[in-house]
Image (cartoon, coloured by chain):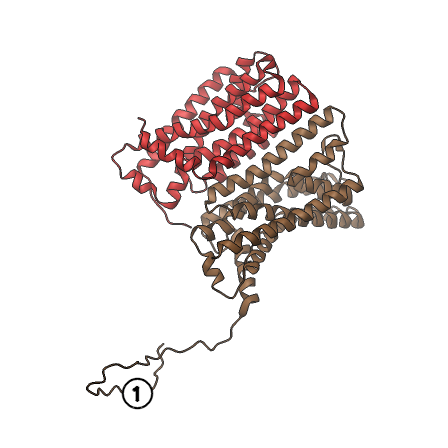
Chain colours: A brown, B red
Amino acid sequence: MAVEQPMRSPVATPGDQTRIHNIGYRNYDGPRLGRSYATRSLYSQSLRGSYGLGRSIKSKVLPMLLFVVMCVPAAIMVAVAVATKAKDLPVDYTRYAIIMQAVISLYVASQAPQSVSRDLRFKTVPLYFSRPIETADYVRAKYAALASALFVLTAAPLLVLYVGALLAKLDFADQTKGFAQGLVSVALLSLLFAGIGLVIASVTPRRGFGIAAVIAVMTISYGAVSTLQAIADNQDSTGAIPWIGLFSPVTLIDGVQSAFLGASSAFPGAVGPTNGEGAVYVLVVLGLIAACYGLLLRRYKKVGL
Amino acid sequence: MYDPTVARLTYRALLGRRRALILGALPLLLIAISVVVRGLAGADDQTASDLLGGLALATMVPIIGVIAGTGAIGPEIDDGSVVYLLSKPLKRPTIIFTKLIVAIAVTMVFSALPTLIAGFILNGNGQQIAVAYTVAALVSSIAYAALFLLLGTVSRHAVVFGLVYALVWEALFGSLVPGARTLSVQQWSLAVAHKVAGGDLVTSDVGLTTATVFLVAVTVLATWYAGQKLRSLTLAGEE
């Protein structure tokens, strides 16, 4: 809608042909929402994007499918527990994510590259940074979005289990404690997995390659660690098992929760870390999360220019 | 049927720049782990069989197969540069066949060769274990490369579907539902390995005849269908 501006009538005077016309452009004088608003929008858009909301049907299929696959076993367990009037749920809240780790890894591998690789490939990152947001805002928004998406993925089945446990009239205090411990553990897991996934994905603009790289890091490290642990268990060198567990994301989370969150360890021979070793686990997990954040910041310092 | 220029371009796309280093990291890890295990546990046939079967054949070969198989054609279709290749006077099946050869070669070099080395480090080829698993890796390289190359032409999310097959179907379903093992590249190649090793350290759930028939059928059908898909390829924009 053009606004009529009073124009100086261009009365042509011979000999003076040059003049600047005011053709009526106006400056924006509405409210400016600023940096935090832009960061929040980036966060919510990335979070929605992680489940394919606001994107095409095809990109909704995979995240939704993985979400369903995460929740269905929990629903089945609850149904069995209610039907058989069991005294306890078939799995611990803390154990659930460890059992379903393949699904969680697939989710990280598919969604971390879609969150950051496409921005790199289509060179939209400089466009973000031409807005009021800074490098740190972009990194924080993307990190928080993927971590929240993962938390939704991992906490939803726990919620199903918890509600089911209450419906089956299991002990309220006991179940609430287990549920809270499970939530803390999946929160840590979400932060750790999201960080690792994003760091790897932010290096490659190729989506396919990013997916394969993330899954390779997740599964190969777990495969290597569990093989070594099994061998150490066979050799009766049980002292080495917790130390080997430090080298893969899944076993790290397993170690933390079996040391401090009352979980039974999934390590071979159920040898969980002691409290002292557990402290090392916590330090390594927190250190890895901080390192991922730092690496992302460093990566985007360069890539934005 | 084989075009050297296409082969060269595919090699460059797969191994160019730093990608060869990333692909090489996995085999190096396997060899490093075998050295550690040999140092910790000494030479033991059961340990060697567990490590080669669990880590090399079940995890590493499929992942390298996914990277090489889908990477041979997926990115080109993804960024649309495949039209320049398709507009050349080459038969589409020739393009697919050439890319398949390259994908197989890359998968073999990066998975079967380290399996052999790791096997020799672990127990010095005792009871033919190293050779048996190497043969299994070679055979499954062919089937995986053909299968994932087909996925690359069919879907834009080929990598994810390939990984879902390799990790969820073969590892998770295979351990829960015995029937799923009949339809698993890993078990087919293990049947061939069983024939080579002779002992009962390497076992498979399918017979050798079934395995061979399935392996050949999957490879040929996947390659043929990928050629057909490429003949009628529609290029779509980014979602």
Image location (x, y in percent) of residue A40: 56, 63
Residue at 55 percent across and 34 percent down: it is B167
Residue closest to the far left: A14
Answer yes or no: is residue A166 visible: no
Instruction: Specify whether B69 is left or right of A34.
Output: left
Label 1, on which residue? Answer: A8
Front-lying residue, A147 or B210: A147
Residue B196 lies, with reference to residue B157, above or below; the image says: above
Q: How many marks?
A: 1
Q: Chain of mark 1?
A: A
Image location (x, y in percent) of residue B161: 49, 38
How busy is the neighbourhood of tag 1: few (under 14 within 10 Å), some, or many (20 plus)? few
Residue closest to the far front: A15
Image location (x, y in percent) of residue A242: 73, 35
Image location (x, y in percent) of residue A45: 52, 58
Residue at 39 percent across and 44 percent down: it is B78
Label 1 is placed on what type of residue? Arg
Quadrant including the N terminus of chain A: bottom left
Answer yes or no: is residue B191 visible: yes
Instruction: Specify whether A211 is left or right of A163.
Output: left
Which structural element holds mark 1? loop
Front-lying residue, B192 or B45: B45
Residue at 71 percent across and 50 percent down: it is A184
Instruction: Specify whether A108 is left or right of B38.
Output: left
Residue A151 lies, with reference to residue B217, above or below; the image says: below
Front-lying residue, A68 or B53: B53
